Image: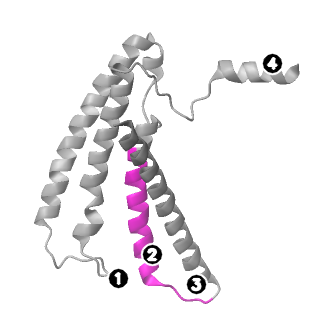
Amino acid sequence: MSSFWRHLDKLESYLCQLLLACFVCLLFVQIVARSVFGNSITWIEELSVILFVWFAYFGASYAARMYAHNRVSFHINRLPRSVARWVEAVGDLAWIGFNLVFIRYAIEYLSLMKPFVKAQTLGWPMKWVMLVLPVAFTLMTLRILQVNYLKLVRGQDPRDPDEVDMAALAAATRAEAV
């Protein structure tokens, strides 16, 4: 099963990188078209917005896996780590509940969407554009469950990759001084 999660991590990471690269390149082309040629390419704007939204949702799922999502943690950091894990798990349980409600309503929303509702310049059916909602929130829910499994069952403590470890930083500084 760990092979599945490793492949999913890579897939999510590559998908986010691809979406980011695509919409940044498209926006660059749009800026050049406007500034240099004085002409706008309308479909680029719409496609860029769609790619950005997909990037944001898949990025949120990946952040949940990396334990790098936004969370108020000042009060949790004051608790012993064994207690803090369970407090975080209760918060994550509420998050999962929200996601399940959101997934349900997103699916309902997609089922009610008429086939003639299309993206204005691209002409794509909006059902396909909005499909990111239930897909990304389902993936995010799986990621929350995965992280809690690692914390509570396996005893691994995933930390935010952007969090600064002051003890390691001080040790590295002392090592450089010598």
The residue to which callout 2 is attached is 45
The residue to which callout 4 is attached is 174
Q: Label 1, secondary structure: give it.
A: loop
Instruction: Provide residue 120's location: percent of width, then percent of height.
Output: 31, 80
The residue to which callout 1 is attached is 121
Which three-letter amino acid code belongs to the residue tagged 3?
Ala
Q: Vertically, is 55 above or below 177?
A: below
For marks 1 and 4, give the CA distance.
59 Å
| Image marks 4 and 2: residues in contact by CB distance under 8 Å | no
Please rate how many residues cluster around mark 2, counting C-alpha atoms within 10 Å: few if below 14, some from 14 to 19, many from 20.
Answer: some
**Residue at point 59% right, 89% down?**
38
Query: Is most of the magenta stretch helix, strand or loop?
Result: helix
Dot 2 or dot 3, earlier in sequence: 3
| Image marks 3 and 4: residues in contact by CB distance under 8 Å | no
For marks 3 and 4, give the CA distance.
52 Å
Chain part drawn in magenta: 37-61
